[in-house]
Image (cartoon, rainbow, N blue to C red):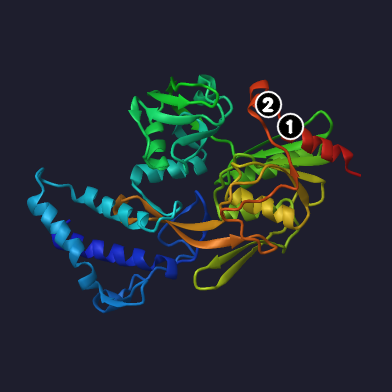
Amino acid sequence: MSSKSLQTFLTIVAAILLLLCAFMAGLIVGWSRPIMPGMPGLSLPFNIPFLSSSNKTGDSSTTNLSVLFQPFWYTWTFVHEQYVDQPVNDETLLRGALRGMLDSLSDPHTSYMDPEQNQQANATLQGDYEGIGAYVDSSGNYLKIIAPMPGSPAEKAGLKSGDLIVAVDGKDVNGLDGNVVLQKVLGPAGTPVTLTIQRSGLDKPFDITILRAKILLPSVDGKLLDNSIAYVHIYTFGDNTLAELKTTLQNLVVQKPTGMILDLRNNGGGYLNTAVDVVSQFIPADKVVVYEQYGNGSRQTLTTRSGGIATSIPLIVLVNEGTASASEITAGAIQDYKRGQLVGVTTYGKGSVQSWVALSNNEGAIRVTTAHWLTPNQRLIDKIGLKPDVEVKITQDDINAGRDPQLDKAVQLLSQAP
């Protein structure tokens, strides 16, 4: 790519990014589907007459973009001509510019992902990826283990809920973005990674070496408990969730359970459309699932679809601090319609919608917050979460002893139901 062509490309990309929030409809929640070229619902201003005219900035001043970008192009040129280690890599500079632009918004859910990060983020929703097999929270100072996946290398190595990863392969990760640390933990199957773990109750961190593997991620599983109560666990809202959920529900319903427990604990979310599909299995058709509220004041309403399998069976939903995004949409709708009680602790509080746009030339993707979502009763739960109807905590002693008081409480409530 010539310098002139690259300059034109960067200017167009920058201009598009500056107007994304005004021009795009949010299609996804949390870690969700990339909007590919040609997908319905995406309207980008590819005809950009304002590139040579004026642009209204956030402080209401009017600035010609050619003037606005002069410092950028001066810096670009100066680095190419004066930086000590030549030649510089244009692709690296481009990715750094995109990352810095989105980081400047100070929104933890708006970011640039390079091609590798984009691939890994999508893989968890597509059903498989390569890594250690653990649900994590990347929002804090350190990457936090929410829970190891059953049968995963992480579980076999002894990782526990609440563990903090303070170093990867001997390198301190304090201050690094959680998503960057996650990329260091992920890697090709068959390769080792050494994690330095800080665990509550221990004075000193310790090392665990884990052999990465290909992790197969079921979206849903279920079983009939001893007391004829059906148990359904949804792990993520991905490509295969609806089909797996329908199969699971059909297999359970024919056994005529007296009640059903829907486990959404440690479910970090996924596709917005999948959340609507899931809610539609438990709530009758044509009911509001969620409102999307955009910055310009407009609103989109998403409603349940027909054909739900479990719309009348007594229901309890298990939630915790790892229940986020699409799983909060599901739990919020069930709670608002009094379709079932929420049991557990207050959820994560991820009430925003992100549009995930794949960039051209395999340059990765951008993830931009474009809306907030509200429950059917128009509750905004961002940074607040959903408060359970019945609060039940799980202590570290419970975890160590293999007890699940939240599940026990759900069974008790359903057993007492008329």
Left or right side of 127 for 288: right
Q: Residue furthest right?
A: 418
At mark 2, the secondary structure is helix
Q: Badge 2 is on which residue?
A: 398
Q: Residue at x 71, y 26 (%)?
A: 403
Which quadrant of the figure has residue 3?
Answer: bottom left
Left or right side of 80 for 33: right
Which quadrant holds the N terminus?
A: bottom left
- Residues marked 2 and 1 touching at CB (< 8 Å): yes
Q: Amino acid at mark 2?
A: Asp
Q: Residue at x 53, y 57 (%)?
A: 352
At mark 1, the secondary structure is helix
- The correct choice, above or below, for 347 with respect to 7 in the image is above
Left or right side of 165 for 237: right
Residue 44, percent from left and from top: 39, 68
Q: In the rendered structure, find residue 353 and report the number of the disc placed on it.
A: none
Which quadrant of the figure has residue 177?
Answer: top left
Residue 339, percent from left and from top: 78, 53
Q: Badge 1 is on which residue?
A: 405
- Which of the pair 48/54 is nearer the observer? 54
- Which of the pair 195/305 is nearer the observer? 195
- The correct choice, above or below, for 257 with respect to 325 in the image is above
- Which of the pair 169/247 is nearer the observer? 169
| Picture mark count | 2
- Which of the pair 17/285 is nearer the observer? 17
Which quadrant of the figure has residue 302?
Answer: bottom right
